[in-house]
Amino acid sequence: MINFESFLAAKGQFVKVSFQTEKKPAAAHKGNTLQKFTTGVFRAGINFANLGSVKDAIANGERGAVQPLPWGEWQQFPYVIKHKESFYLRLYPAKGAKVETTYLVNGQEVSKADFDGYLTPSDAKSPDKFECFTVKCENVIALCDDVTHQEILEAI
């Protein structure tokens, strides 16, 4: 279920989100369909510039000041970004939250290692750490389903 109003009311709160991602295979695997389905608890409604880790990094000289969005524009700050007629939700990973991802190649479930074997090396590489990420609205399967007390405890 897509509960967009609850999402827009989540000011720094934990929300449960499920989304799918289509990946482009490497040239050697052209013609294969690669999909990821992810469900997890994330935070929403946060101003990136107010994150403690960002403030600390600026204070320690590890990064510069927060800049405007590198692409797109805020449709509804700090929740929704619009870019080229598409809309994206901005989400923040929660520290201890359980995130479940299912990997499919041509509709068949495979391990992450097998899935990564269909990608280019740069696409298979996961970032070590990221402060936030975006999900294209059309890829959202469920938004703001009930989050259990246990899921919140695991996220903090």
Image: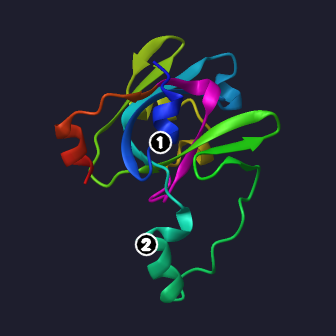
Instruction: Name which residue type carries label 1.
Output: Ala
User: Tag 1's secondary structure?
Assistant: loop
The answer to whether residue 57 is above or below residue 35 is: below
Left or right, residue 69 beside residue 108: right
Q: Residues within 10 Å of mark 2 (few under 14, many from 20)?
A: few
Q: Which mark is residue 34?
A: none
Q: Who is closer to the viewer here, 36 or 146?
A: 146
Going 45% across and 58% down the picture, which residue do you hit? Answer: 128
In the rendered image, residue 74, in percent from the top left (x then y), is placed at: 71, 50
Residue appearing at x 50%, y 11% in the figure: 107
Q: Secondary structure at mark 2?
A: helix
Residue numbers of the magenta segment:
127-142
Q: Outermost residue toward the bottom?
A: 60
* Residue 124, picture quadrant: top right
Residue at mark 1: 9
Q: Nearer the viewer, residue 99 or 138?
A: 138
First in sequence: mark 1 vs mark 2: 1
Binning the other alpha carbons within 10 Å of mark 1 as few (below 14), some (14 to 19) or many (20 upward) gives few
Residue placed farthest to the top in the image? 107
- Give the CA distance from mark 1 to mark 2: 24 Å
Q: Is residue 44 above or below residue 118?
A: below
Residue 130: % across, % down: 49, 58
Reading the image, the residue beneath label 2 is 53
Quarter that holds the N terminus: top left
State the residue at coordinates (66%, 32%): 26
Above or below, 23 against 50 in this view is above
Q: Would you say residue 24 sits in the magenta stretch?
A: no
Residue type highlighted by circle 2? Ser
Residue shown at 54% from the left, 12% from the top: 106
**Residue 140, magenta (yes or no):** yes
